[in-house]
Amino acid sequence: MSDDSQQPIVVKRIKKGGGGAHGGAWKIAYADFVTAMMAFFLLMWLLGSTSQGDLKGISDYFSAPLKVALGGGSGSGDSSSVIQGGGEDLTRSHGQVKRGDVVAEKKNLNLQALKADFEKQERQRLEALKASIEAMIDSTPSLRQYKSQLLLDITTEGLRVQIVDEKNRPMFDSASSELKPYTREILRDIGKSLNSVENRISLSGHTDAAPFVGGDRGFGNWELSTNRANASRRELIAGGMDEAKILRVVGQSSTVLYDKADPNNPINRRISIIVMNKRTEEAILRDGNVAETEQAADLPTANSAAASASEPVSGAAAPTH
């Protein structure tokens, strides 16, 4: 037998395995990719919902982390970082500005700007009216002699025109609401000028602090100041002023003195005409609507007082008020 017959036989078998697509390695790679994409979009969402102050804080934190970690911050734009000494949740709601809040704030600022512009224009109109009345007084010989008794100024309520008494030249007869002829002329000329603006008017009568001695019917400085304010209202309308412009007529007795140092000074006896700005007018209308219901039960008493105030007063002579 030959040597070939003694050689062992070697059988080679080819083991076929699954293809690359049938393995599990790709799933791990895909999971890593999806996780990275989720982290990326989460980062985009956080940056999109973060205010400018917080964005600056984040930038500062990554540019100088040690400095921020030691200094800290509130994260609302008033410090160097959103992270205080090591970190704070960036998804917190405080310190953020919503889009709706920004829009509302802009609208509020626009309204405030419009209101300020309107008030500025209104003040300019009142100042022009003041200059017009002053020019009328200077150009009218019959009024020029009473210039010292006509006081004009701009107040928080509007343009105030005050007609005051002088010792030897009162506006009214002593202890009465009967106007002197020159006072009628002054009021009628002022009434014509007031029609040049759309603002409404407030009238108030004032007396000095001397007690009124006018009989035993309870008639005093309150009633006298109210009657004088109403008498002035009638003369303004007679001069051509629109009656609808009158919003308030009050008597204030001696509660609001022009010369507080001398309560009996004749200058305290005056008629005050206020060309009201819109803010004062709206406040009176708003308060009046509330007070109307509260005072409804007192109307009979108020009417009775007004009736007694309009009756002639008898008794001892009264000082000038």
Image (cartoon, grey):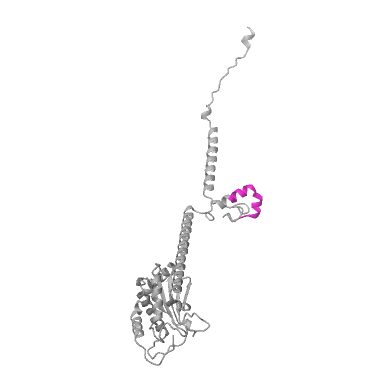
User: In front here: 158 or 127?
Assistant: 127
Write the residue at 53% across / 45% down.
44
Residue 236 % position (x, y):
38, 75
Position of residue 311 in the picture relative to residue 280 (left or right): left
Residue 277 % position (x, y):
44, 68
Write the residue at 59% across / 49% down.
58
Write the residue at 46% across / 73% down.
138
Position of residue 71 in the picture relative to residue 320 (left or right): right
Question: Does 67 lie within the magenta span?
Answer: yes
Q: State which quarter of the image contains the C terminus.
A: bottom left
* Magenta segment: 56-73
Q: How many marks?
A: 0
Residue 124 % position (x, y):
47, 65
Up-down relation of residue 113 to residue 139 (above or below): above
User: In front here: 104 or 212?
Assistant: 212
- Give the quadrant of residue 206: bottom left
Residue 278 % position (x, y):
42, 67
Up-down relation of residue 171 to residue 48 (above or below): below
User: In front here: 215 or 293?
Assistant: 215
Position of residue 5 in the picture relative to residue 120 (left or right): right
